[in-house]
Each structure stands twice: as structure tokens, then as C-alpha cells.
Image (tube, rainbow, N blue to C red):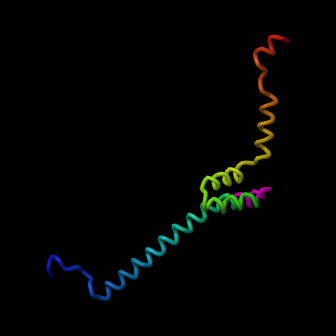
């Protein structure tokens, strides 16, 4: 055996190793694409689990997010943030904001 010979060449083992490598490559690429798909569908799944009122909007934004990725971020925000509670909290914060210094001195 010389230094330049490659083991398993022109044998049945060579063919088996090529088949295994091809299968491993296909499985790895498929698993990666499936993982990306599942991650991308996260806003839709969250909206369905919370029975969100804007499921159609979130679904549309998620699909548009394949092209423009910032739209997907908006879909995630809509899915995970309860807008009604956020608006009520903002309104209550605005109503109960401390009075300015000038108004306290006049009273």
C-alpha cells in the first residue's frame, strides 16, 4: 500500500459510505428546514393557543414575513402581547400620572 492510495476506493464499502453520507446530508438539511419552519410558525401557534382575536392578521403577517423579515417580528409582537391589556395599562398609567410641579403650587 503506497502513501497515495485511498482506502475503500473501488470497493463495496465505498458505495455504502457514499450512500450513508448522502442520507445524512438529506436528513440534516430536512431537519434544519423543518426547524426553521416550526420557528417561523411560532406566532400562528401562539395565536391559536390563546384564541387571539386577530388570528387572520397574524397568519398573514407571518406569511409576509418570509419575504420581509421585519413583518414577522410584528406578527410575533401581536401574537405575544395582549393589546387590550396593554392599552388599558397605558390608559391607567396616563390617568394616574403624577401632576406637574406647577399645578400643585397653584392649588
Is residue 49 depicted above or below 25 in this figure?
above
Residue 62: give x, y in percent of width and height. Answer: 66, 60
Picture quadrant where residue 45 is located: bottom right
Residue 104: give x, y in percent of width and height. Answer: 80, 14
Is residue 82 depicted above or below 1 in this figure?
above
Q: Which residues are magenta?
A: 46-54
Residue 26: give x, y in percent of width and height. Answer: 47, 75
Front residue (pair 24, 61): 61
Residue 25: give x, y in percent of width and height. Answer: 44, 74
Q: Is residue 90 magenta?
A: no
Identify which residue is drawn at 48% across, 74% down.
27
Quadrant location of the N terminus? Answer: bottom left
Picture quadrant where residue 48 is located: bottom right
Is residue 41 depicted above or below 101 in this figure?
below
Identify which residue is drawn at 74% across, 58% down.
57
Tell me: 4 left or right of 91. Answer: left
Tell me: 21 left or right of 38. Answer: left
Q: Is residue 53 magenta?
A: yes
Q: Residue furthest left?
A: 2
User: How many numbered marks appear?
Assistant: 0
Amino acid at each position: 500500500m503506497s502513501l497515495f492510495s485511498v482506502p475503500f476506493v473501488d470497493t463495496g464499502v465505498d458505495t455504502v459510505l457514499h450512500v450513508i453520507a448522502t442520507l445524512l446530508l438529506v436528513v440534516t438539511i430536512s431537519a434544519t428546514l423543518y426547524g426553521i419552519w416550526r420557528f417561523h410558525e411560532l406566532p400562528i401557534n401562539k395565536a391559536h393557543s390563546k384564541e387571539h382575536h386577530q388570528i387572520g392578521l397574524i397568519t398573514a403577517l407571518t406569511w409576509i414575513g418570509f419575504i420581509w423579515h421585519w413583518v414577522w417580528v410584528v406578527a410575533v409582537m401581536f401574537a405575544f402581547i395582549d393589546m387590550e391589556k396593554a392599552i388599558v395599562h397605558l390608559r391607567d398609567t396616563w390617568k394616574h400620572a403624577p401632576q406637574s410641579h406647577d399645578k400643585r403650587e397653584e392649588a
